[in-house]
Image (cartoon, grey):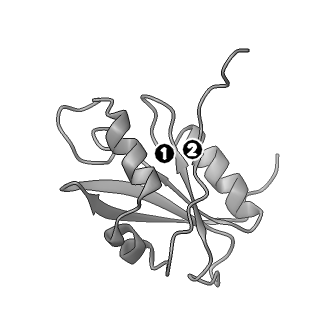
Amino acid sequence: MEENKSIKTNVSFESAGLKLAVHLYTPDPDTSPSLPAIVVGTPGSSVKEQAARMYARRLADRGFITLAFDPAYQGESEGEPRGLEDPPTGSRILRQPSPSLVRATRLHRIALAHWASAPPVAA
């Protein structure tokens, strides 16, 4: 089993009036915050500790800064009713991270390489 070299930090940010929970993965403690970050989305009804964590950690182990977050209404993020699937809100957060996310993660910018973990489409 491969050892994880990345460092995980718990952060949160506000989007559309809701506090969202994020795991920030960095390659090492001295990672420059000016590097671009990859936001790893979750598949439907998933939370950051599942598929998104695997992808975020593996990318961080290879030198990228990555973020995996619980969508609104899911996991440790706020929102009622719990468990609500809201794809438009999730997509907006992935495409346009809020200034509060940039502040919360201390990143200078988030140059988004959108990685949304989703099942493959059958041909």
Which element is circle 1 on? loop
Please give the name of the residue rendered at 32% of the width and 64% of the height, measured from the top-left corner. Answer: 13
The quarter holding residue 99 reads bottom left
| 60 relative to 50 in the view: left or right | right
Horizontal and vertical percent for residue 78? 23, 47
Assess whether mark 2 and mark 1 are in contact (beta carbons under 8 angstroms): yes
Q: Is residue 120 above or below residue 3?
A: above
| Residue 21 x/y as whole percent | 36, 55
Question: In the image, is residue 122 above or below residue 72?
Answer: above
User: Would residue 75 be visible to someone looking at this image?
Assistant: no
Q: Callout 2: helix, strand or loop? A: helix
Q: Which residue is mark 1?
A: 48
Residue beneath label 2, please? 52
Do we see residue 103 in this rendering?
yes
* Position of the C terminus by quadrant: top right
Nearer to the camera, 87 or 77: 87
Which residue occupies 74% across, 68% down? 63
Separation of marks 1 and 2 at Cα, in angstroms: 5 Å
> Which residue is pictured at 48% across the width and 45% down the height?
48
| Residue at 49% across, 81% down | 108
Q: Position of residue 86 (x, y in %)?
A: 31, 34
Which residue lies most toward the front here? 123
Along the horizontal axis of the image, is 92 left or right of 115?
Answer: left
Amino acid type shown at disc 1: Lys
Q: Amino acid at mark 2?
A: Ala
- Single out the residue that lies furthest toward the right: 1
